[in-house]
Amino acid sequence: MSIIETLLLAASLCADCFAVSLCSSVTLKKAGWRSVLLTALAFAVIQSALLLAGCVLGDLFYGIVEKVSNVIGFVLLAYVGGSMLAEGIRGCGEGKNLNGWKNILLGGVATSIDAAAVGVSQSMSGAGVSDSVLLLASVFLCTAVSVAAGICAGKAIGNIRGRNVGRIAEAAGGAVLVGLGVAVLL
C-alpha cells in the first residue's frame, strides 16, 4: 500500500470519530484542553488497538481463506464504508454524548469497529502486522487530531451546523472505504 493510500485509509477510518466528536461536543460540560486531549487520545488508542486486533485475527485466518481474501477484503470494506456512507446521509451516528469516561469509551469502541474490519482485510490482502506499522501510526495520529478538531469545531459552530459537517465527514470517509474496497477486489 502506498503512503497516499495509507493516509487516505487512516483519514477515512477517523471520519466517524470526527463526526461523533463534532456532534457530541455541544453537550460537553467542559471542553478545556486537558479534556479534549484525553478524549482524543482515548479514541486514538481504541481505534489503533482494534485495527491491530483485526490485523492479528486476519493473520490467524489467512492460510484458511487465502484464495478468497480479495473478495473478503472487498466485502468488509464495502460493508463498513457503505454503513458509514448511509449513516452520514441519515445523520450523526453513535455517541451523541461524550460526558464521562464511560461515554467516551463507548463512543470510541462504537466508532472503531470499522478499524478492526479494515485490519482483517489488510491482513488478508497479504499485509502482515509488521507491514501495518505505518497504517497504525497514521490511524492513531489522524484519529487524535480529528477528534480534537471535532470537539473544538463543534463547540465553535454549534449543534445544528455540527450535524451537517459531521454527516459530510462520515459520508466522505465511507465513500473512500468503498473505493479502497473496489481497489482490493481489482
Image (cartoon, rainbow, N blue to C red):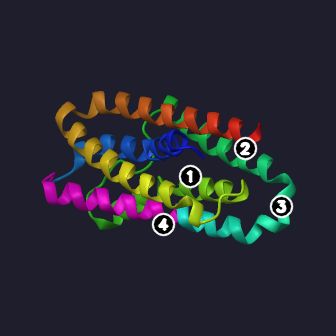
Task: Give coordinates of residue 149: x percent, y percent.
Answer: 26, 43
Q: Of marks 2 and 4, which one's residue comes earlier in the chain?
A: 4
Q: Of marks 4 and 3, which one's residue comes earlier in the chain?
A: 4
Q: Are marks 2 and 4 in contact (CB under 8 Å)?
A: no
Q: Of marks 1 and 2, which one's residue comes earlier in the chain?
A: 2
Q: Mark 1 or mark 3, which is nearer to you?
A: 3
- On residue 114, which mark appears? 1
Q: CA distance from mark 2 to mark 4?
A: 22 Å
**Was residue 46 drawn as part of the magenta stretch in this picture?**
yes
**Residue where numbered disc 3 is placed:** 65
Question: Considering the numbered disc 3 on the image, is that residue within a helix, a strand or a loop?
Answer: helix
Question: Considering the numbered disc 2 on the image, is that residue within a helix, a strand or a loop?
Answer: helix
Look at label 3 and name its amino acid: Val
Look at label 1 and name its amino acid: Asp
For disc 1, the neighbor class at 10 Å (few under 14, some 14 to 19, many from 20) is many
Q: CA distance from mark 1 to mark 3?
A: 20 Å
Q: Of marks 1 and 3, which one's residue comes earlier in the chain?
A: 3
Q: Mark 1 or mark 2, which is nearer to you?
A: 2
In this picture, residue 153 sits left or right of residue 91: left
Q: Residue at left 17%, top 35%?
A: 156
Task: Give coordinates of residue 57: x percent, y percent.
Answer: 66, 69
Q: Are marks 1 and 2 in contact (CB under 8 Å)?
A: no
**Was residue 44 drawn as part of the magenta stretch in this picture?**
yes
Q: CA distance from mark 4 to mark 3?
A: 23 Å
**Residue where numbered disc 2 is placed:** 74
Question: Considering the numbered disc 4 on the image, is that residue within a helix, a strand or a loop?
Answer: helix
Residue range corresponding to the magenta coloring: 30-50
> Depth check: 153 or 70 in front?
70
**Residue where numbered disc 4 is placed:** 49
Task: Give coordinates of residue 35: x percent, y percent.
Answer: 19, 59
> Depth check: 153 or 73 in front?
73
Q: CA distance from mark 3 to mark 2?
A: 14 Å
